[in-house]
Amino acid sequence: MPAAYDAIAKDYQRTKASPVRAAIETWTLGQLLGDCRGLSVLDAGCGDGFHARRLMVAGAARVAGVDVSPAMIELARAEERARPLGIQYACCAVEDLPDLMCAAGFNVVLASYLLHYAPTVEVLGRMCQRLGSALASGGRFVGLTENPDQQPADYPGYAAYGFDKQAAEPRGEGRRITYGLVSGRQIIRFDTYWYSRETYAAALSAAGFGQIAWHPLQLDPSVPTPEFYGDYLRNPPVLGLTAVRRGAVPQP
Ligand SMILES: C[S@@+](CC[C@H](N)C(=O)[O-])C[C@H]1O[C@@H](n2cnc3c(N)ncnc32)[C@H](O)[C@@H]1O
């Protein structure tokens, strides 16, 4: 079965040029990731490798990217062929991450807009389990994921930032959220799923993570028009989520 992003891979890649990506997304992830020089990083749900490349250029010792969409992985590999950085890419669902990849014992797992693609609590649990297994003891999980504090009534108001977000009331575990992203002259649509803070915490905790923490989005202080991002930051569609892998990982 084709992955949801296969049909929109190139158009999604184009949306990476949106100002919010640099000013908030990349800045926030940079703050949460900290100095990754010399570390091994797994970019889970890496898409076209946008963040994987940034991490490699910033001095990570090793970066691997996995994504369920063959089309997204092909974009990442094409970039790697054009400008080789030594990043390894694999096409695989995170919840099915093979033991071989997990054996690497990464220092950091980056999950930028990943966990909210789990269509059920069970899949969310398996994603966290496999990501926990991929990390060395003490390794860090750093992600951006759906803001669990938003209600569907909070979703309008993102047109200035190039997207819309909709969901039916009432909010509930695993309820579908539909995004529409402006890409050139068209709008690409995809679904994510809402989970509460408690559900994320339970999934991460069962997968051997501790120090689970939510983080507000942050704005790059060097942007020339900070007021433009005010509505976005006051009503963030996603939040940062970090956790640290404890010692032994519980087996499912
Ligand atoms: C919104 S894009 C984000 C891409 C990249 N992380 C970034 O920040 O630019 C979400 C990506 O997650 C991938 N994805 C969704 N569900 C996944 C899963 N279960 N396992 C691996 N990748 C998944 C999609 O194919 C897509 O490339």
Image: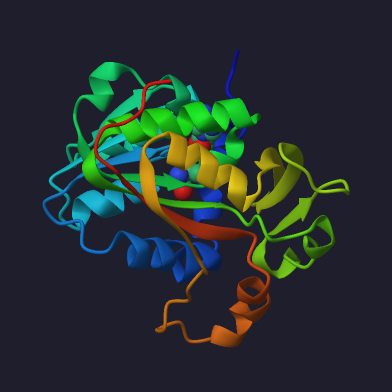
Q: Nearer the viewer, residue 163 or 111?
A: 111
Quarter location, residue 199: top right
Q: Is residue 17 above or below residue 8?
A: below
Q: Which quarter of the figure is the N terminus placed in?
A: top right
Residue 82: tell me if it is visible.
yes
Q: Is residue 147 above or below residue 174?
A: below
**x, y percent for residue 209:** 37, 43
Residue at image x 78%, y 58%? 151
Residue at image x 48%, y 76%? 219
Left or right for 223, reference 100: right
**x, y percent for residue 95:** 46, 24
Q: Is residue 224 above or below residue 45?
A: below
Residue 47: tell me if it is visible.
no
Q: Which quarter of the figure is the C terminus placed in?
A: top left
Q: How is the image coloured?
A: rainbow
Residue at image x 71%, y 70%? 160
Left or right for 87, reference 123: left
